[in-house]
Image (cartoon, rainbow, N blue to C red):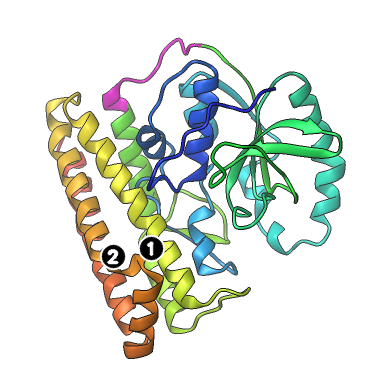
Amino acid sequence: MQPLPWVEGSGQLESLPVCLRAILTHFGCRHSYEELVARLGLGGLIVAARGEPLGYWPTFGRDIALRHVGEQLGLRIRDLHPPEASSGLSHSTEYHQHFQDSYLPLIDKALAHEQPVLVWRGWPAPRDHLWGVVVERQNEMLLGQTLMHDGRTMPLTGPGHQVYIVEGWEAPRTAPGLDRVFEEVLQTSLAQWNGTWIRRSDLITGQFVYDAWQDELRDPRVSGRRSLHQHHPQAVRALTAARRNFATWLRTVAGGLRGDLVPRAATWAASCDRLAETLAPYESNEYVLDVLETHGPARLCEALEAARQIEAETYERLRQQKEQA
């Protein structure tokens, strides 16, 4: 099949929504990046991945709601294994051969039927933790699209840790209304905040991530070539970009919500703004390096604690508003 219609904008750092938007556009459906971030549960998400470098934490757990959201949007999505099956694959020496033997034939079959294939991991660095879409095979090489390459195809150079085949699209018979979508997003975010959204021992979400993040700063277990002053800003940039895009969606939909949901959307959007403003200085590698050399990790931890407090107050207020409705 031909490469998909690809668009990625400034501040659009979530690779799965970009891929999903390209697939939907291919089928003639228009959905904004901000909407997909919200509906996939990524606008309010914060994740820690045990045993993984801090900078890559925001790439884990992105597909938990993919099949549900895809179905609502009319996509028929088949996962080749459930999300929890990707646990521990980063350190598996046998998985590469398993991917070759078990998944490549299924991917080839999908491509033969003009079906795009969503793949997490396996792309060339620095995209090796991102989602991409495999669209064709040339000789022995799978080619696809992912971020930071202007929509041009590139080879899949390693085994994907998660694979979904998009078997087709048809207009959904009963698409959820805007009120229901907002309430689902809220329910998802409350579950994330309470740590109950992802049922995997290696992933933490919500309020508990702020503790894990501060522990990492005080006693960093950073692997590879990159140091803490690079990993921390990378994680911050992902978090603040997600909140900014989420705030945009909340303000966009507010006018179409029923009356009691409007103040909740306004409360939430303002909270996202406050969090992004609080952490914005720490998006810079140079600034974080200077802070670490001058003050150590204490100031970084203080900023994270302030961000946690913003979100804790917001979710408590949203929970109360939900119960009173």
Up-down relation of residue 26 to residue 14 (above or below): above
Q: Position of residue 322 (x, y in %)?
A: 21, 40
Q: Give amino acid for label 2.
A: Leu
Q: Residue placed at 54% from the left, 12% from the top?
A: 170
* Residue 218 lies in quadrant: bottom left
Q: Any mark on residue 96, and which?
A: none
Image quarter in which the C terminus is found: top left
- Most foreground residue, 56 or 205: 56
**Residue type at tag 1:** Val
Whether residue 33 is in magenta: the answer is: no
**Dot 2 corresponds to which residue?**
279
Q: Looking at this view, is 38 or 258 the one in front? A: 38
The one of 292 and 200 positioned closer to us in this rendering = 292
Please name the residue shown 53% across and 50% down the image: 61
Mark 2 in CB contact with mark 1 (< 8 angstroms): yes
Label placed on residue 236:
1
Q: Is residue 172 magenta?
A: yes
Where are the magenta residues, as a range?
171-180
Residue 228 location (% of width, % of height): 48, 77
